[in-house]
Image (cartoon, helix red, strand yellow):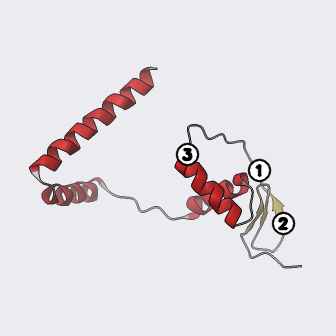
Amino acid sequence: MVTPKRGKVLSPRFRFDSRLEIQKMKTVPLTIRRCPEDVHQALKSRAKTNRRSLNNEALTWLDDQAKRKQKVVTGREAAEILRKAWKLMTPQEHREFGNDVEAYVKKVRHERLH
């Protein structure tokens, strides 16, 4: 029998903790709607490669993402990034970008109303 590494997810309901004991984890149901077809196929392919169910592959991926340290970008840093990007764009790209932003805002507003 192979002993799992510490912190490894054994199943959606159990986790091997730092004292090398199995502890029951509290789980909650999660439904994902409107998953793009290419994302679904990629997840399905990864699940097959890793010999996991689609659900366990999604839980493994979500668990990995939750453990990552997210770098917080301050308002100043975001403004600096946008200024640098703006300088690299041509006037035509500025217009296209502005039009794309406006279209996205309209789409989001429409989705909220309906």
Expressed as whole percent of the image width and height from the top left, the position of residue 42 reads 58, 56
Which quadrant of the view contains residue 62? Answer: bottom right
Q: Nearer the viewer, residue 68 or 38?
A: 38
* Residue 92 as seen in the image, left or right of residue 22: left
Disc 1 marks which amino acid? Answer: Lys
Distance, label 1 to label 3, CA atoms, is 30 Å
Pointer 3 local density, CA inside 10 Å: few below 14, some 14–19, many at least 20:
few
Identified by mark 2, the residue type is Ile
Q: Could you tell me which residue is drawn at 73 percent across and 69 percent down?
A: 8
Of all residues shown, which one is farthest toward the top?
A: 114
Q: CA distance from mark 2 to mark 1?
A: 13 Å
As helix, strand or loop, the secondary structure at mark 3 comes to: helix
Mark 2 Cα shell of 10 Å, populated few (<14), some (14-19), many (≥20): some
Q: Is residue 106 left or right of residue 65?
A: left
Badge 1: how crowded within 10 Å, few (<14), some, or many (20+)?
few
Position in image of residue 110 (x %, y %): 39, 24
On the image, which quarter does residue 73 sit in? bottom left
x then y, percent, for residue 50 = 70, 67
Query: Which label is found at residue 11?
Result: none
Residue under label 3:
37
| Residue behind mark 2 | 22
Against 10, residue 82 (above or below) is above
Instruction: First in sequence, mark 1 or 3: give its number.
Output: 1
SS of the residue under disc 2: strand
Residue at mark 1: 26
Q: Give the image location of residue 35, x and y in percent.
A: 56, 42
Q: Residue at x 53, y 44 (%)?
A: 36
